[in-house]
Every structure is written in C-alpha cells, then in structure tokens.
Amino acid sequence: MSFSNLGLSKPILEAIREVGYDKPTNIQDKAIPIVLSGKNLIAAAQTGTGKTASFVLPILERLSASTTQKKKRFRALILTPTRELAIQVNASIEKYAKHVNLTSTAVYGGVDDGPQRQKLIDGIDILVATPGRLIDLYGKRAVHFEEAEVLVLDEADRMLDMGFIEDINKIIARLPQDIQNLLFSATLSNPVRDLAKSAIDHAEEISIAKHSASKANIEQWITTVDKDKKSSLLAHLINKHQWQQALIFIETKHGAAKLAAQLEKRGIKAEPFHSGRSQNIRTQLLEQFKNGEIAYLIATGVGSRGIDISELPLVINYDLPYPADEYVHRIGRTGRADAKGEAISLVSKDNFKNLCMIESRLGHLLERRVIEGFEPKKEVPISILNYVPKSKRRS
Ligand code: AMP
C-alpha cells in the first residue's frame, strides 16, 4: 500500500513526501481509511508504530474541507497524558499540516496559561491538550466545546494510569454527542475497554499491539547486578561502549539526581529529566538531547512518552518499571519506525517481580548477559512466565 491509495489529498501527500515517509506503517494502513470514513475507532497501538500520523493525517484531510472558525472554539481535540506528548503531537501536526490551511496548538499544565489562552481566542482547528489544563481553561471560559467534530484519546491507558478518568469523563460530557471518537492505547486493558464502552458507540477495532510488544528491531537484553553496584556498572558500560546517546530510565526524581551526581564523579555528564524541573528546562533539555549536545538523559516515567528521537539508539532501564506495559513504552523510545535500537535493563534481586511481569507480558525471557566484574552476590532467579501478581489473582 502507498499513501496515495489511502484517500489523502495532494497537500497532505506533499507534506508526507517532505518528511520522508516512503510508505504507511501498519497502523496507518488500517486506521487512515477508517478515520476518513468518519467512523469511530478503537486502536491498540503503541508509540513508535506511527500512530500519531494514523489519526493526524485523516483528521487534517477531513477538516481541510472547510475553515470555519469561531472564537474560543476548536474542531478536533486530541487528549494526551503528558505535556511532552502534547508538544510532540502538536509538532507532528505542524509538519503534516504544512500545505493545508489549518491551525493547531497544545495546552498543558505546569506553565502560565496566559499565552495558551491567547492562542485560543480566535479559535483553533486542532487542539492538543492534557485533560487537567483543558478543564481549567474551560472553567475560565477560555475555551468552548460545542464546535468539536473529532475527539482523540491518545495513550488512553496511560491517561487512566495517571488518574485522569474524572477529567476525561467531564470533557466527554461537555462535547457534542455526535462527534467522531478515536481511542488509541498501547493495550486494551479492562479499564480502557470500560472507558471505550462508556464513551464510544459502534467503533471499528484494530490491533497491532501484540506484534510490536517485542519488536524484532529492538535488541533487548538484561544484566543482573547487585543494587549497590548499578551506578558503577552503568559508568563501566558507558565507558566501555562509548555510547553516543542513551535515554536512561529511573523510578524517582531523587534517584535521577543521585545517579547524575554518581556519573559525574566518574567523568560522565548526564542530565536528570523529571517533573521536578521546570517545563522550560525540560523543553530545553529535550532540545539539547535531540541535537546531541547532551549525550545522556536520566528520565523518570514522565519522560517515557513524549520523547521522540528518530535515531535514538539506546534505552537503559536503570530500574525495571511497573506495570509491565511501561517497559514496552520505555523501550519503544528506541527502534522508532523500524530503525534498529537496543534496550538494556539493569536488574537486581529486588526487581525480580517486575522482571517476571515484564517477561510474562512479552511472552518470553529476555536474554541475560554477564558483565565481568559485576556478577551479583544476590542472584536473580529465572522468571515464571505466567506470573500473576497477588493483587490480581482470582480466588
Ligand atoms: P509515533 O508512533 O506516532 O510516535 O511515531 C513514531 C515515529 O515514526 C515518529 O518519529 C514518526 O515521525 C515516524 N513515522 C511515522 N510514520 C512513518 C512512516 N510512514 N514512515 C516512516 N516513519 C514514520
């Protein structure tokens, strides 16, 4: 299939050609015709699969037929879990909308809302928003919902994990009832299905998640190590391999700052990236990371969604995340759109449960590599692949 067979018009095909995509990805093949037809859609697809373009391109196509704008109104709303993702999605829209006459903006918390309100005054075609900030702006009458034609719930699972269900329900309740609803989620877990059931009637369903959960183009391996040796092991690996760039994930803000200091003592410069740093600093750090000025970024979960660097070669899990889907999201930061990537996890004995859950989710054990001089005193057992955490066991 090529983009020109999907029903997209010239100005959009021209933008696709300019960003250099040769052919649609799997999700784009499946989703674009459905969205163009005006149907509702529930799609299981992770980041890294090209899912953003799979809804942005047909939305641009549908909206470009007219340009009516009313003050403080929007026509398409894309809800995202984090500000990073909101910025990211809006950047994609700007790329794809280069030759159509449509406007877009992103609104998100953590920054002064003045400039965001200003951008909404004359109305906007596509609004990308985090749920909390949108509700705030709505409360201040800076935005009205009645011209909405399309709603996208992007990374719905993550929005639910982050506790946005009430905000999402409030937003849906205020949108016109007959709009087109599109839901994208890495997994169609029960809570996501519940949300879909309550918010979306008669949806087409597509799923490509299984295939990409363990993407063949990402080389994944783990090494077991005692907890107190992790930072010296990481420094050793960085020095040995001379990695050009790596995104390092860690659980806590405090942990990120501590690891940055530990690496610095060993002559390695790495920047902590977490919600404790201001939005301006985070935006700047991402920019510097993208253009290579910063080689190593130590991110907490907040960083795992919005970071889109087409050539990111390496993701390191300094801690193993919970839940298991988070692992899939994290490693999806590398190997984007079928480029080659590597994902390494440093696993200590206290990570064993998380390891079981991740390997169960992937459906296979991860390759273990031994790093000489760092063999753990506390061995990490081999996982049980059908592991179910106690809290989820049926009695
Ligand atoms: P996403 O899953 O939307 O986060 O996109 C992942 C990455 O794939 C982004 O860097 C996109 O620019 C890129 N991408 C999206 N569609 C295509 C395509 N058809 N061909 C090549 N790269 C693409």
Image (spheres, rainbow, N blue to C red):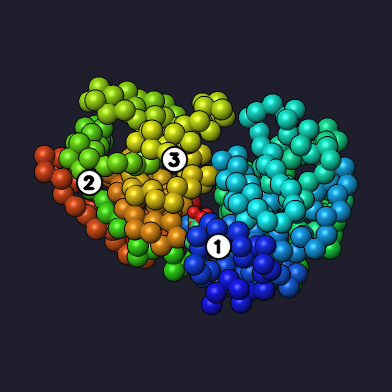
- Residue tagged by mark 3? 290
What is the crowding at mark 1: few (fewer than 14 residues within 10 Å), some, or many (at least 20)?
some
Amino acid type, label 2: Thr
Amino acid type, label 1: Arg
On screen, residue 381 versus residue 85, left or right, reads left
On screen, residue 370 versus residue 204, left or right, reads left
- Badge 3 or badge 1: first in the primary sequence: 1
Q: Position of residue 12 (x, y in %)?
A: 65, 62
Query: Which secondary structure, mark 2?
Result: strand
Q: Is residue 63 visible?
A: yes
Q: Is residue 151 visible?
A: no
Amino acid type, label 3: Lys
Query: Which secondary structure, mark 1?
Result: helix
Tell me: is circle 3 under 8 Å from ligand 1. Answer: no
State which mark lies toward you, 3 or 2.
Answer: 3
Residue drawn at point x = 46 percent, y = 67 percent: 210
Q: CA distance from mark 3 to mark 1?
A: 22 Å
What is the crowding at mark 3: few (fewer than 14 residues within 10 Å), some, or many (at least 20)?
some
On screen, residue 246 versus residue 282, left or right, reads left
- Badge 2 or badge 1: first in the primary sequence: 1
From the viewer's side, name the closer residue of 346 and 316.
Answer: 316
Q: CA distance from mark 3 to mark 2?
A: 30 Å
In the image, residue 330 above or below residue 272? below
Image quarter of the N terminus: bottom right
| Residue 224 tag number | 2
